[in-house]
Amino acid sequence: MRKMRFFLLLLLGLPLLSSCGYNQMIELREGVDAQWAQVENVYQRRADLIPNLVATVQGYASHEQETLQGVIEARSKATGMQVNAGELDAAALQNFQEAQGQLSSALSRLMVVVERYPDLKANQNFRDLQVQLEGTENRIATERMRFNEVTQAYNTKISRFPQNLMAGIFGFERKPYFEAEQGAREVPKVEF
């Protein structure tokens, strides 16, 4: 008789469980993971362009070794950092952003060095690389925005009632967002 009640309760409860949102939470989590992979892809594209950029600049500005070395080291650190999408948390994302920020800073210093070499700026290879790098930076911004969008959809889903109950039972946790780097809100000074 007990087994019959359990089976009857299970049969009546099955429609309730089918609308718990578990499958949709899985889809959204997979979307976050896929978008994270795309973010890593565009960062890797930038890292792949840097050796060519450094080699081109090095040919013109061999005595700017310190700046070139800084770019190489920042690239090495940024590409050496691996963040698994399944283990993505706020601390891991912060470390990833810091490494990428250091690389961006080193590239900015490299561009300042380039300003001192008019022949280099006129070099077709350098201009092509600069355009590629600029396009990659735009792709990075776009993919980070898309990552934040899919992360918002996922976080919203697992936070709403009754899905928050199921999310807690099945271990769905909030994913962190990309945030602006420190100092990004400050207006840069331009002096002539």
Image (cartoon, rainbow, N blue to C red):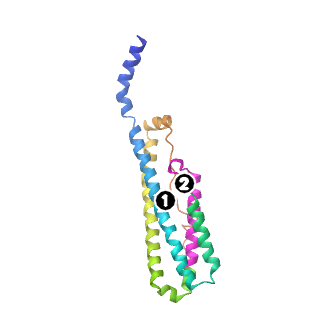
Give the CA separation, mark 2 to mark 1.
9 Å
Q: Out of 59 and 183, give the one closest to the viewer.
A: 59
Q: Residue furthest right?
A: 66
Q: Quadrant of the N terminus?
A: top left
- Is residue 94 visible in this depiction of the protein? yes
Q: State yes or no: residue 95 in magenta.
A: yes
Residue type at mark 2: give it: Val
Q: Residues within 10 Å of mark 1 (few under 14, many from 20)?
A: many
Magenta region: 82-110
Residue drawn at x 51%, y 43% as measured from the top left: 173
Task: Give the crowd class for mark 2: few <14, some 14-19, many >=20 residues within 10 Å.
Answer: some
Q: Quadrant of residue 80?
A: bottom right
Residue with the mark numbered 1: 40
Q: Position of residue 156 (x, y in %)?
A: 44, 46
At horizontal 51% and vertical 75% (from top left) the residue drawn is: 52
Q: Disc 2 marks which residue?
A: 83
Residue projecting furthest to the top: 1
User: What amino acid does circle 1 point to?
Assistant: Glu
Please give the label number shown on residue 104.
Answer: none
Q: Is residue 76 magenta?
A: no
Residue at 62% over, 69% down? 73
| Residue 186 locus on image (x, y percent) | 56, 69
Front residue of this view, candidates 29 and 164: 29
First in residue order: circle 2 vs circle 1: 1
Q: Give the main secondary structure, helix, strand or loop, of the magenta stretch.
A: helix
Residue 60 image point, x, y percent: 56, 85
Residue at the image point whose x is 43% and y is 71% from the top: 135
In the rendered structure, are the residues bearing label 2 and label 1 in contact, judged by CB atoms less than 8 Å apart? yes
Find numbered disc 1 in the image and state the secondary structure of the residue it sits on.
helix
